[in-house]
Image (cartoon, rainbow, N blue to C red):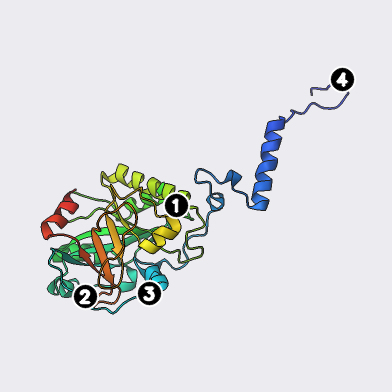
């Protein structure tokens, strides 16, 4: 045993910077300071929220309808511009009557695949494959919970559980559903910059794994409130906008036009109905990349 001249056993000393760092970290946790929160600079980034408690109740527009209201389930006035009718579904729709939807004129569908990194839609196979087998162009979407895990983690989970893409002419690029938090703070406890960075992480990871730029689903009201009306994505990511009424209305900053408009949450057979903003050949072009 090594003994100092004082007669006491030798113990390695801790440097002052190390001790100070530990004390600051403890103080930040106790006071809720953002000093150790990570790259986003948000206090919640270091303290992840629990996994979603009722993911089967979260779908594209579930929180839009709750916070922004709904309109009658009738289709908006016919437009002189070309469009394609579509629907979006999740587990709350159960087994979907795809042949009935096809007969009514529906030609494309988006299907919820995942939420956070813990949930997969138990009806995904019937919905995703069923729409495809009926002849529709279909794609998958991810319901984002930015407070439970990183954008990269959620994009990776999505791609691995139904959100991939193939150049078969009938598969749309994946979509990221960004809307009001069903479990707490509207903006998931993140700053505008934090949310924008989270989405950049998600989109970059998705593109690295699939080669495609994903679609973004969001409402103008939520976008303004939670991202500061960021214009960071309009030049790259197609916009899927929910607004239940006679027009798509005001768009978020960065987008000069919408690609898909979710115009009702109470349609026949399946509630959520959409219109693609273009002719069928443009929808096929989006599928082909």
Task: Locate residue 180, reporting x and y percent.
Answer: 43, 64
Q: Which residue is mark 1?
A: 195
> Mark 2 or mark 3: which comes first in sequence?
3
Dot label at residue 5: 4
Distance, label 1 to label 2, CA atoms, is 33 Å
Distance, label 4 to label 3, CA atoms, is 78 Å
Distance, label 2 to label 4, CA atoms, is 90 Å
| Quadrant position of the N terminus in the picture | top right
Q: Which residue is mark 3?
A: 69
Name the foreground residue: 179 vs 21: 179
Distance, label 2 to label 3, CA atoms, is 16 Å
* Residue at (47, 59) in percent of width and height: 187
Does residue 235 show up?
yes
User: Can you tell which of label 4 and label 3 is closer to the viewer?
Assistant: 3
Does residue 153 show up?
no
Q: Which residue is mark 2?
A: 75
> Mark 3 or mark 1: which comes first in sequence?
3
């Amino acid at each position: 045993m090594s003994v100092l001249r004082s007669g006491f056993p030798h113990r390695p000393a801790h440097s002052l910077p190390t001790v100070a760092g530990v004390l600051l970290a403890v103080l930040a946790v106790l006071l809720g300071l953002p000093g150790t929160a990570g790259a986003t600079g948000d206090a919640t980034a270091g303290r992840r929220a629990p996994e979603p408690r009722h993911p089967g109740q979260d779908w594209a527009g579930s929180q839009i309808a709750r916070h922004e209201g709904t309109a009658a389930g009738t289709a908006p006035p016919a437009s002189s511009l070309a469009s394609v009718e579509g629907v979006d579904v999740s587990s709350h729709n159960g087994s979907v009557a795809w042949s009935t939807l096809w007969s009514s004129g529906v030609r494309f569908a988006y299907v919820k695949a995942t939420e956070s990194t813990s949930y997969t839609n138990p009806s995904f196979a019937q919905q995703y494959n069923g729409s495809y087998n009926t002849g529709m162009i279909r794609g998958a979407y991810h319901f984002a919970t930015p407070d439970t895990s990183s954008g990269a983690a959620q994009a990776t989970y999505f791609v691995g559980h139904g959100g991939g893409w193939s150049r078969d002419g009938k598969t749309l690029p994946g979509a990221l559903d960004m809307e009001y938090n069903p479990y707490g703070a509207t903006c998931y406890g993140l700053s505008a910059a934090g949310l924008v960075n989270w989405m950049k992480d998600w989109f970059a990871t998705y593109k690295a794994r699939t080669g495609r730029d994903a679609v973004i689903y969001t409402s103008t009201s939520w976008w303004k409130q939670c991202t500061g009306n960021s214009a960071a994505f309009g030049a790259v990511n197609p916009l899927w906008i929910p607004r239940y009424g006679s027009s798509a209305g005001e768009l978020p900053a960065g987008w000069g036009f919408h690609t898909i408009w979710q115009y009702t949450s109470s349609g026949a057979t399946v509630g959520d109905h959409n219109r693609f903003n273009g002719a069928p050949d443009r929808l096929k072009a989006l599928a082909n990349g």
